Image (spheres, rainbow, N blue to C red):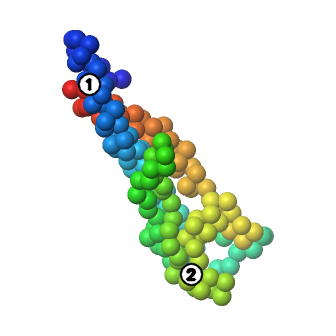
Amino acid sequence: MARISFKGMDEYVKRLESLTDDTDEAIEKAVDAGVNVLADAVRAALETIPIHPDKEHGSPKNPLVGLTAQEKADLLAGYGVAPIRKDGDYINRKVGFNGYGSKKTKKYPQGVPNSLIARSLESGTSWRQKSPVIRQAVNRVKKQAEDAMKKELEDQITKLMN
């Protein structure tokens, strides 16, 4: 925890007022620190997804494990972090998949949505084995992300109070 010492009530009040003026900026930096830890862990987990040949087709008796090389490349290309968005008193930052894969189908003429590919990998389908790499990565680094946010916020408060 940050430790600050000073003398006099007027100085204390002045420092508290300066702290409240810059609260949003300090919180945004803390959210960034946590999101960076999380995003790096998920990207590293995506790199470990096994690849199967394009020609293979899964079935309930013989489900596919992993993704094709192109699906994996599309997921990595569509993975990212959205800009900070303020919703009232909340400061949000989303991490996820955007865009479409390069494989076009009759149902998906623009390409299969990357979020759909990621969801089928996470939860499994009747023809794809469940591989919850994203969930596992998030659970593995949750405490590290919280610690990074806490440290950054304490640093910001210390900087603002001095």
Residue at horizontal 46 percent and vertical 64 percent from the top = 79
As drawn, the residue found furthest toward the top would be 8
Residue 127: x %, y % from top left: 72, 71
Residue 122 vs 105, above or below: the answer is above
Earlier residue among tags 1 and 2: 1
Crowdedness near tag 2: few (<14), some (14–19) or many (≥20) residues, C-alpha within 10 Å: some
Numbered badge on residue 46: none
| Residue 67 appears in the rendering | no
Real-space CA distance between mark 1 and mark 2, rounded to the nearest whole angstrom: 54 Å
The residue where tag 2 is placed is 111
Q: Quadrant of residue 21?
A: top left
The residue where tag 1 is placed is 15
Residue 28: x %, y % from top left: 37, 45
SS under mark 2: loop
Residue at horizontal 50 percent and vertical 73 percent from the top = 99
Crowdedness near tag 1: few (<14), some (14–19) or many (≥20) residues, C-alpha within 10 Å: some
Q: Amino acid at mark 2?
A: Gly
As drawn, the residue found furthest toward the right would be 61
